[in-house]
């Protein structure tokens, strides 16, 4: 699990860096933006190919139950659609895995919170703080 989490948290996540850089630029030369988009899509495609090859014939990345590796993945994998970086249909194992992860009640709860909703949940979450409040409270 640690190796998969490391891959997702470093190589897979980092592949989106050029796309995020292009997205966050308020104004940039069209050639620079095109270069960032082209490079980003190539790197994201490569990482998707690698991840597709790593996915085994199990319900989740590590086995038959949801783990940290799956929840780390679901937070990042959605960026591919946001950036229109790859055709999700080209990665059937990843697409099926994402559907299974997103069907989990805890993941549905987290996605609802992320969307600004206030779901009832199971009681395991003791509260949610907006990032600005966390920064105000804990910034040094």
Image (cartoon, rainbow, N blue to C red):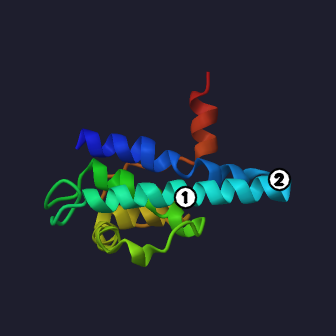
The one of 78 and 41 positioned closer to us in this rendering? 41
Residue of label 2: 26
Residue 27 as seen in the image, left or right of residue 136? right
In this rendering, position of residue 22 left or right of residue 27: left
In the picture shown, does residue 48 fall above or below 96? Answer: above
Tag 1–tag 2 contact (CB < 8 Å): no
In space, the residues marked 1 and 2 are separated at their CA atoms by 23 Å
**Image point (25%, 60%), residue name:** 55
Q: Earlier in the sequence, mark 1 or mark 2?
A: 2
Quarter the C terminus occupies: top right
Q: Is residue 21 left or right of residue 104?
A: right
User: Which residue is at a point 26% across and 56% down the rendered structure image?
Assistant: 54
> Who's the residue at 64% across and 59% down the image?
38
- SS at badge 2: loop
Q: Which mark is residue 42?
A: 1
Q: In the picture, residue 33 is in which quadrant?
A: bottom right
Q: What mark, if any, has residue 58 been given in the picture?
A: none
Residue 6 in picture, x, y percent from top left: 35, 40
Where 115 sits versus 5, above or below? Answer: below
Q: Residues within 10 Å of mark 1 (few under 14, many from 20)?
A: some
């Amino acid at each position: 699990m640690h190796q998969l989490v490391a891959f997702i948290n470093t190589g897979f996540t980092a592949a989106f860096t050029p796309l995020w850089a292009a997205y966050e630029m308020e104004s940039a030369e069209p050639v620079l933006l095109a270069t960032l988009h082209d490079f980003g899509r190539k790197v994201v495609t490569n990482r998707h190919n690698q991840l597709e090859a790593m996915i085994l014939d199990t319900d989740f990345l590590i086995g038959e139950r949801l783990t940290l590796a799956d929840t780390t993945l679901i937070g990042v994998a959605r960026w591919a659609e946001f950036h229109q970086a790859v055709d999700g249909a080209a990665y059937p194992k990843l697409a099926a895995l994402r559907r299974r992860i997103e069907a989990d009640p805890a993941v549905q709860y987290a996605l609802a919170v992320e969307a600004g909703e206030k779901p009832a949940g199971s009681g395991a979450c003791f509260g949610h703080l907006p990032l600005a409040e966390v920064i105000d409270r804990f910034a040094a």
